[in-house]
Amino acid sequence: DGSYTLEIYVISSAVNSKTVENAVSDISSGITDKFSDYAVTACTADAAENFVSLKLDNVAADRSIKAKCVENLLSDSRTKLSVQQKTEIDLTTSGSMLVAGKTRSGKTTGIISLLLQVLARGRDDFGSSVVIIDPKQAELSRLPHTVTLDADGGAREILQKINDFAKSISERQKVLNDLSEERGDVVHWWEAEMNVSLLFIDEYLALRTIFPKKADKNEANYSLDEFDYLLRRIVTMGASAGAYVILSTAEASVESGGLPAVIRSAMSTKILFRPTLPEARLMWDSHRLEALSVRNFKPGDAWFSSTDGVHDEVSFVHFPQMDFRTYECLGTLLKAYYGD
């Protein structure tokens, strides 16, 4: 499929697997002739450190999905979201998503490609929902069934929608628990014919600055603490009920007004559009980035990992190229999804 595995065995006591791992960038740049377009995209050592396995990919190959309509995006399963050819986010084995990328990196378009796939499957009979929150009051806020700031610039309606989403998880989980008890075995959300439920928060870090740090005595639950609490609950508990969060941010920062570490660590799928190494090191351990080549990235190019057993290592992807009116289509699907 255009990928190769190169195994380098350590047979001398003078070197070890770490020696090979440290040479990955030199090995990658040394691939020439008919494999000149290939580079090392992943590096793993076996437990006994007898050999190092390198994954080689044709980094010049275009594996992006070129979609003329939403149907071109859909995978063969409602539990999987297409990213590019032969790359999908498997929601049966992964969780919520952290997406970072500066302006004009293709981040919003990439996220819309995921939203369209969930909306196209429709609602289930167990309270599934697709909630889009746009605190910037930009293009997304003009779409039907999206949530933005209150008239006074506050975020009370946003907090209420997030609270409703958290409650729906409890209700969906109760259905699964009852089914499991009835059948005498664990029933997963996809086995119960549930569809994906999704909460998308655009510009997450900007939204956090809107909430007061401490609740006013007249609005006991309106505070940053309540917002963070609800989000932690959804991110850590939602996957078992088929409910996931997409957090979008322009900066991949942590704490100090950035992404709380506990939420960052719970996001099992991470995507960085038009990546740079300094930003990537805020999302992944540095050693996981050693095999990746930095080049002139274009909008839609991203580094991606997901704890689904297939894409655990950070790799390069290109999100779908959609040759249709994405915002118009998103609005139409939102109306259909909610029965307008």
Image (tube, rainbow, N blue to C red):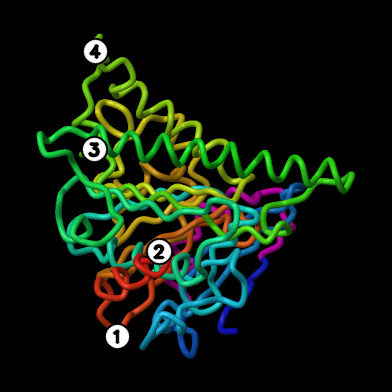
Where residue 209 is drawn, which disc sits there? none
Residue marked by disc 2 = 115
Left or right: where 265 falls relative to 333: right
Q: Quadrant of residue 150?
A: top left
Answer few, some or many: residues within 10 Å of disc 3's Cα (few below 14, many 20 plus, some between 14 and 19).
many
Sequence-earlier tag: 2 or 1? 2
The residue nearer to you, when weighing 146 against 22, is 146
- Kind of residue indicated by mark 3: Leu
Of residues 45 and 137, the one nearer the viewer is: 137
What amino acid is at disc 1? Asp
Figure quadrant of the C terminus = bottom left
**Secondary structure under badge 4?**
loop
- Using the numbered discs, state the Cα–Cα distance from disc 2 to disc 1 in whole angstroms: 16 Å
Q: Earlier in the sequence, mark 3 or mark 4?
A: 3
Q: Position of residue 63 (x, y in %)?
A: 45, 81
Amino acid type of the residue tagged 4 in the rendering: Asn
Of mark 1 and mark 4, the one earlier in the sequence is: 4
Residue 218 badge: 4
- The mark closer to the camera, 4 or 2, is 4
State the image coordinates of residue 54 (x, y, percent, origin top left). 59, 65
Q: Which residues are magenta?
A: 8-31
Distance between the alpha carbons at the discs numbered 4 and 2: 36 Å
Give the labeled residue for mark 3.
Answer: 207
- Seen in the picture, residue 132 relative to 90 is either above or below; the reply is above
Q: On the picture, is 21 further left or further right than 7?
A: left
Residue sitting farthest toward the front = 340
Determine whether the residue tagged by mark 1 lies in a helix, strand or loop: loop
